[in-house]
Image: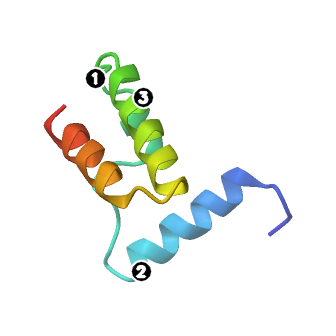
Amino acid sequence: MKKDDDETCNKTVMDGLAKAGMAPAATPAAAASDAPIGDLSPMKAIAADAAKLVGSGDNAGAKARIKDLESA
């Protein structure tokens, strides 16, 4: 397999998963064809806030923001 050969890499991984009996329910191509799930920008903002809080050492604040993410 050549470096940066995404198609071959994807096929190799998918073949390995299939041989192990762990093939995913949907291939990336199938997942891409699904209907859009809507605007995720509010969730992205919450995740960014939580990451900033973790970076500053405020784990309690980050935990609260992750709860917000779960409910969003």
In which quarter of the view is residue 72 placed? top left
Q: Which of the two residues, 5 or 40, is positioned nearer the viewer here?
A: 40
SS for dot 2: helix
Q: Which residue is located at x 21 percent, y 38 percent?
A: 68
Pinpoint residue 28: horizontal percent, then vertical percent: 46, 44
Please, which residue is most extreme toward the right here? 2
Front label number (1 vs 3): 3
| Up/down of 24 relative to 36, above or below | below
Q: Do the residues labelled 3 and 2 touch (CB within 8 Å)?
A: no
- Residue ID for mark 1: 37
Q: Residue 63: percent from the left, percent from the top? A: 27, 54
Tag in front: 3 or 2 = 3
Residue found at x 34% / y 16%: 39
Gap between marks 1 and 3 measured at Cα: 17 Å
Tell me the kind of residue under disc 3.
Answer: Ala
Mark 3 / mark 2, whichever is N-terminal: 2
Pointer 3 residue: 45
Q: How far apart are marks 3 and 2 (CA)?
A: 39 Å
> Which residue is label 2 attached to?
19
Looking at the image, is 23 positioned above or below residue 26?
below
**Mark 1 or 3 closer to N-term?**
1
Q: Quadrant of residue 17?
A: bottom left
